[in-house]
Image: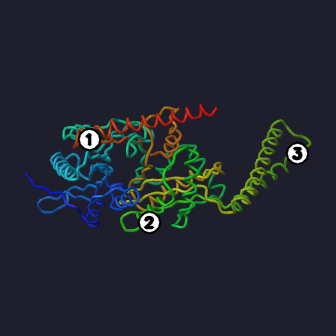
Amino acid sequence: MEMYKLVRLKEEKYESFLKEQPKSHFLQSYAWGELSKVKKNLTPYYLGLIDEKKNIVATALLLQKHLPLNYCYFYCPRGYIIDYENEELLTEMTKQIIKFAKSKKAIFVKIDPDLIYKDYNYLDEEQPLPYDTNKIFENLKKLGYKHLGFTKNFETMQPRYTFRIDLNQSLEEIESHFSKTTKQRIAKAKKLDTYVEIGTEKDLKEFYHLMTLTESRKDFVSYNEDYYDTLYDILNGGENSKAILFLGKVDIDKTIKKIKENLKQVNNQISILPIDNLSKSAKNKLNELTKQKENYNQEIKKYEEYKKEYGNNLTLSAHMIVEYADKAWVLYAGNHNILTETYVNYYTYEEHIKYCKEKGLKVYDQFGTIGDLSKDNPRFGLHEFKKKFGGDYIEFLGEFDYVTNRLMYFIFTKLVPFYRKRIRNKSKKEIENEVKNTK
């Protein structure tokens, strides 16, 4: 039997192996480990499994979360970089990782492999997978990993569902899978002379502003401005990863000029109608043109007011995508509360899809959606929006914990959450009583 050894890897060796693997992910990158250290207070370990000839055969980014009493747990984002179908290799990797985890007094090791459980194309047809997921699933359980269930929303460390576009297709084929409304909205954005450009570090403040507007509108809170600044700096600090800002903008003067051209055409059409002797169809045509004229005049007035308040060049959408190896992920997207009828958000998505295709990347990932598709799900609108771009609807296998200390795992995953919930409920009740007593 071949002998293997788990070693710590320096950035160059770690990255050179990782980037060559077909399932490499930015969440496994050296840069992401450094960001986790700086902004999340996690300790990253860049580990490699080497064979007798000192060839790297598997790697793992382990993020150590420190707990009271010198305990900890490890999270391995998107799992090990390994051939999961190679049972001998997976067994050895597990053995070595768990040995390492125990040496650090870890309670458990969490993995969420980038392994697809189900894949549906834009027509909702299930696609064949390049590996036997059920066999891998059973083997992981046999090795001692505890599956945490087929969750449907965002209960896990990373989304269990996403939309992915295969960039090996031609751009024409990719865009043909866009929904009809998406194509119409992109066309409208272009007709209004909106535009998309790649931003720089100086645009991060504007990006953060749009993120805060989106968060308040959607009722969630993510990160502060410093987090995005640090993320951008670290991911762009080397050669292995890249964070790119796409800014969807409107030049109000150009848009007003475009509307005025449309208004002129309407006025010309009205002027040639025989006003004194209108047929029924001509009257209908006149009514339609009059409404268009009113709408155009209202739009001109609205844009002029926005220009006074915001200036001429206004950023309506700001998206951050992460490029790593041969893939890209739409990590964050912020949108303004105004001028949503320009559909710049749709146009911005189209532009970064085109960018990724032209760069020769192979996968474009929208990084997260839901599995619970009931219409009362608050995330259903997000799901429907992402679906409009025609990507494959992907379901991942999910999270697994390898428990190394059963008692502490029970305390950490069952008793502590229960205690925290009781404290929250108690505090809520105390507040309610205080309110009653002040009446």
Residue at far left of view:
1
The picture places residue 12, in percent across and down from the top left corner, at 28, 67
Name the kind of residue labelled 2 in the image. Answer: Asp
Name the kind of residue labelled 3 in the image. Answer: Pro
Q: Are marks 2 and 3 in contact (CB under 8 Å)?
A: no
Disc on the earlier residue, 2 or 3: 2
Q: Which residue is mark 3?
A: 274
Disc on the earlier residue, 2 or 1: 2
Q: Which residue is mark 1?
A: 408
Residue at far front of view:
437
The picture places residue 208, in percent across and down from the top left corner, at 54, 57
Residue count near mark 2 (Cα–Cα under 10 Å), binned few <14, some 14–19, many ≥20: some
Q: State the separation of the CA atoms marked 2 and 1.
A: 37 Å
Q: How many marks?
A: 3
In the displayed structure, would residue 184 be above or below residue 10?
Answer: above
Disc on the earlier residue, 1 or 3: 3
Q: Secondary structure at mark 1?
A: helix
Q: Secondary structure at mark 2?
A: helix
Residue count near mark 3 (Cα–Cα under 10 Å), binned few <14, some 14–19, many ≥20: few
Q: Which mark is residue 37?
A: none
Name the kind of residue labelled 1 in the image. Answer: Met
The picture places residue 341, in percent across and down from the top left corner, at 65, 48
Q: State the separation of the CA atoms marked 2 and 3.
A: 65 Å
Tell me the mark number nearer the camera, choosing from 2 and 1.
1
Visual colour scheme: rainbow
Q: Which residue is mark 2?
A: 233
In the image, what residue occupies the spot 83% across and 48% down? 270
Tell me the mark number nearer the camera, choosing from 2 and 3.
2
